[in-house]
Image (cartoon, rainbow, N blue to C red):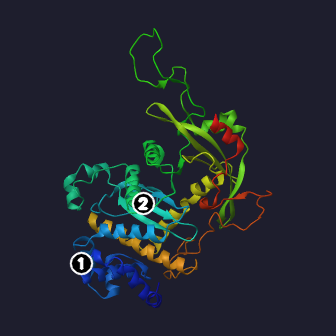
Amino acid sequence: MNDKEIRKFKKRLAAFLKNFEDCFGRRELASHLGTYVTGQMSDLQRKSVEPMAKAAGIEPRCLQQFLSLYGWDHLRVRDLLQQRVAREHAHPGSIGLIDESGHVKKGRETPGVRRQWCGRVGKVENCIVTVHLGYVAGDDFHGLLDSELFLPQEWSEDRERCRQADIPDAMVHRPKWQIALELRDRAVKNGVVFHWMTFDEGYPQNPEFLFALDDRGQHYVGEVKRTFTGWLAMPALLYKRRPGAKGPTGHFPRLKKQAPPPITVENMMRYSPQVRAMAWEKFYIKDTEKGPAVWEAKAVPVYLQRDGLPTRPHWLIIARNVEHPEEIKFFLSNAPAGTPLEVLLHVAFSRWHVERCFEDEKTELGLSHFEGRSYKGLLRHLIITSLTHLFLAEVYQAMGGKKPPRPDGLPGPHGQLGLGPLPVDGRPAEREILGSSGPRPMPDPSLEPAGAALPPQSQTHMAA
């Protein structure tokens, strides 16, 4: 936004930020929040502390100390942000989004920096990685609710280096999937309801992540690698020791010796007569710059392996791009029997929302522009950026989805702060695509009748 556009929303922004005033104690600190948020919305090319402070006519050290030294309750700001989303943006088909983002950094003082994979540039780079929790409510609202630094093992083992970066002694290396669970649980405690969760294939590499969601009663549809394993049929179990059997007693139940090993989902698709016999169904996903995206999919029950034993049935969803059949995705879901296949695909393909959030926050709000050496400063920057995004998301929603102003000279991303791809449940009716008489549009999950079912063959396998 330019100065004129920011002035247009000045009263609305002041009313929005007033909800967080009690987190600061002093009016001066609350005013620094307004300066920071205004700077992030401005048309500055660089949204780091120094240019934002100079644009506001204050000394850069004021904002630097605001981020890293001054005593205000940034964790309460985060809690109030989540509580506001829970209160004002509840939705019967809400989706939680888990993903990570890399931020290229020079030097070695930025908290958590090291040479590691950076998805932003698509290669190993000197960067920090942050794990994020996003939220989608319907077709006109999305944003990031929480963020946390991924602390590499080498940092965790060097506590003196951590102390120099203001990283608490209690903060140690955790896998990204554990951080994701912490973010999800914290939002739930603040009243956020996720009817669904979705994530990329990196998180279920440790199946304990899926089992943790199962134990929480959290429905999900997440992508898995083609090497993910399970059974298409319940393997035989031994429940008690056979009379006269010799050797150690062992634990019961356990797999029988003749039980087949689990196989990869790719081999299920390629070689299982059961899966190969199932018909593909076409689904319109969304409009893209190259035209409508159409995928075809099928779903089959599978049993996962947990502690050496099969779990209850989960859904394996296999989807392939109609125009590029070599592009195949595998998704896993713990949705109950009777969940429509199109609903599972709606959730599975909702990850574009979090990618849009990253793009908007990086290109328009300066998410990656943090230049400090303090973990507290980094965390406060992440929280304020989510707060700024929430304000703009509410402006966007209040304007009925009309594109809000964005900084001059920046690329125009197709998303909530830009033009925006059509939501999956908003395609024009009765459109013919690729010669098909009707790939089915994917509906809003909240609008599906409870009795709607997956394809008959899938339902039969589930009953078996």
Residue 273 image-quadrant placement: top right
Q: Is residue 399 above or below residue 436?
A: below
Mark count? 2
31 sits left or right of 399 in the view? left
Which residue is pictured at 67% across the width and 41% down the height?
458
x and y percentages locating residue 204 in the rendered image = 47, 46
**Most foreground residue, 285 or 314:** 314
Whichever of labels 2 and 1 marks the residue nearer the N terminus, that label is 1
Mark 2: amino acid: His
Q: Residues within 10 Å of mark 1 (few under 14, many from 20)?
A: few
Disc 2, SS: strand
Residue 188 image-quadrant placement: bottom left
Q: Quadrant of the C terminus?
A: top right
x and y percentages locating residue 348 in the rendered image = 57, 54
x and y percentages locating residue 324 in the rendered image = 68, 52
Q: Is residue 368 visible?
A: no
**Most foreground residue, 74 or 22:** 22
**Most foreground residue, 224 or 117:** 224
**Circle 2 is placed at which residue position?**
132
Disc 1, SS: loop
> Which mark identifies residue 65?
none
Question: What's the distance in space between the residues labelled 2 and 1, CA to CA?
Answer: 28 Å
**Circle 1 is placed at which residue position?**
25
Q: Nearer the viewer, mark 2 or mark 1?
A: 1
